[in-house]
Image: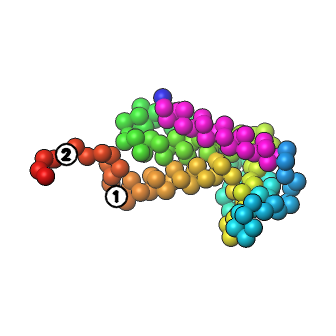
Amino acid sequence: MRMVAVGLAVMLVDQAAKWWAVHQLAPGVRHPVLPGLIYLTRVHNPGAAFGLFPYQQVFLSLGAIGLLLFAWWRRRDIQRLPKGMRFAVALGLGGAAGNLIDRLWRGAVVDFIDLGVLPVFNVADMAIVAGVAILSWFVLLGRDAAEPRENEGGA
């Protein structure tokens, strides 16, 4: 149940941040936060990450809905994963839900975090990338890599 709360928190923080961006930032205007490093620039992305599949909202929305339904269907298997993996899945699903809301409600995803060298992104995108990174870490180092180990005796 805690991981559901993590996913919901990601979705809510993402939507709150996007609401703020839509109401406070003019589209396409770059606002420096740390000049030369971080800017806030509101854009509406009609595609997926890096502008892939532009104007394919039905395809992208169905993909996200399918992912969320698959996770619900496999929830018992997910509950048996180590905590770190469950956390990563919750981050990714919360991010997917946040971007899905935008696609369904606005017809495009609101992005506003601008580092200059990357495409503009949002909180949901950060959660998805963090979730994938954490899952990758588990895959590369072994599923139980981040789980605490029992003291095997000795000094």
Which residue in the structure is indicated by mark 2?
151
Q: Residue at x 66, y 49 (%)?
A: 123
Q: Residue at x 48, y 46 (%)?
A: 88
Closer to us: 32 or 137: 32
Cα separation between marks 1 and 2: 20 Å
Q: Amino acid at mark 1?
A: Leu
Q: Is residue 46 visible?
A: no
Q: Answer with mark 1 or mark 2, whichever residue precedes in sequence.
A: 1
- The answer to whether residue 71 is above or below residue 28 is above
| Local SS, label 1 | helix
Image spot of residue 72 (x, y percent): 52, 33
Q: Residues within 10 Å of mark 1 (few under 14, many from 20)?
A: few
- The answer to whether residue 127 is above or below residue 80 is below
Name the main secondary structure of what is drawn in magenta. Answer: helix
Which residue in the structure is indicated by mark 1?
141
Image spot of residue 27 (x, y percent): 86, 55
Q: Is residue 8 visible?
A: yes
Choose mark 1 or mark 2, whichever is in front.
2
Residue lying farthest to the left in this orientation: 154
Q: Amino acid at mark 2?
A: Asn
Q: Residue at x 25, y 46 (%)?
A: 149
Image spot of residue 53 (x, y percent): 71, 58
Q: Residues within 10 Å of mark 2 (few under 14, many from 20)?
A: few
- The answer to whether residue 138 is above or below residue 8 is below
Q: Is residue 83 magenta?
A: no
Closer to us: 70 or 119: 119
Q: Residue at x 52, y 41 (%)?
A: 90
Q: Is 53 displayed left or right of 29 in the figure?
A: left
Which span of residues is magenta-colored? 2-22
Q: Are marks 1 and 2 in contact (CB under 8 Å)?
A: no
